């Protein structure tokens, strides 16, 4: 499966990262709106190359447990973000998802489209029973993405994460396979 995983949606291609993806990733990870909900205050070429390197190494894992993919526009191949499914307990069939998007593309439904495809991959291909996701509670856009994808809030942890010299509340969302299967089909 190494270097061959490709998922598609109406507008996106979710594909394996390549070493050359660091420049497009650095461009959006340096954006002040992106940095708001991350512990980083800035990103360097070395930081992002190491970030991409982690994903390249994960592609070679056997058995593979981390599927972090580049989100590219189907129309022009432009990398606009990242999303993944990370199996944290294969025996119990549990995973989490994560996603990030270039702020220039926020508000267009790309994150929701990617998350729905990641959930499909996690349940249909990886055979997961439960998939969860987390975000800080001030990240209203991320909350909307998870809710629009059929996930429900399971927990609200007060002052559970420390970064940027302050405590942040965090939220945990999740969806079970049977809940995912009962979701209405979303047409373009």
Image (spheres, rainbow, N blue to C red):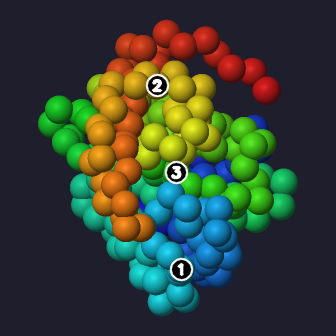
Q: Which residue is mark 2?
A: 151
N-terminal-most mark, 3 or 1: 1
In which image quadrant can residue 91 be found? Answer: top left
Q: Is residue 25 left or right of residue 73?
A: left
Horizontal and vertical percent position of residue 39:
42, 67
Q: Is residue 125 visible?
A: no
Residue drawn at the location 21% of the way across and 41% of the way down: 90
Up/down of 146 relative to 78, above or below: above
In which image quadrant can residue 167 be found? Answer: bottom left
Up/down of 4 relative to 94, above or below: below
Q: Which residue is mark 3?
A: 99
Horizontal and vertical percent position of residue 111:
63, 44
Q: Which residue is mark 1?
A: 42
Please give the label number shown on residue 56. Answer: none
N-terminal-most mark, 3 or 2: 3
Residue drawn at the location 17% of the way across and 32% of the way down: 92
Observer-side mark, 1 or 2, equals 1
Disc 3, SS: strand
Up/down of 111 relative to 5, above or below: above
Q: Is residue 127 left or right of residue 41?
A: left
């Amino acid at each position: 499966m190494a270097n061959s995983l490709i998922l598609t949606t109406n507008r996106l291609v979710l594909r394996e990262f390549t070493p050359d993806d660091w420049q497009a990733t650095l461009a959006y990870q340096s954006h002040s709106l992106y940095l708001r909900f991350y512990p980083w205050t800035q990103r360097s070429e070395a930081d992002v190359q190491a970030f991409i390197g982690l994903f390249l190494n994960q592609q070679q894992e056997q058995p593979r447990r981390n599927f972090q993919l580049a989100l590219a526009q189907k129309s022009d191949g432009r990398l606009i973000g990242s999303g993944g499914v990370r199996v944290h307990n294969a025996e119990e069939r549990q995973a989490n998802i994560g996603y990030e998007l270039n702020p220039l593309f926020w508000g267009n439904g790309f994150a929701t489209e990617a998350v729905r495809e990641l959930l499909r991959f996690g349940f249909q291909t990886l055979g997961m029973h439960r998939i969860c996701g987390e975000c800080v509670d001030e990240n209203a856009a991320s909350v909307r993405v998870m809710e629009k994808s059929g996930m429900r809030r399971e927990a609200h942890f007060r002052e559970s994460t420390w970064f940027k010299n302050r405590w942040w509340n965090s939220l945990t969302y999740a969806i079970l396979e049977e809940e995912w299967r009962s979701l209405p089909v979303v047409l373009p």
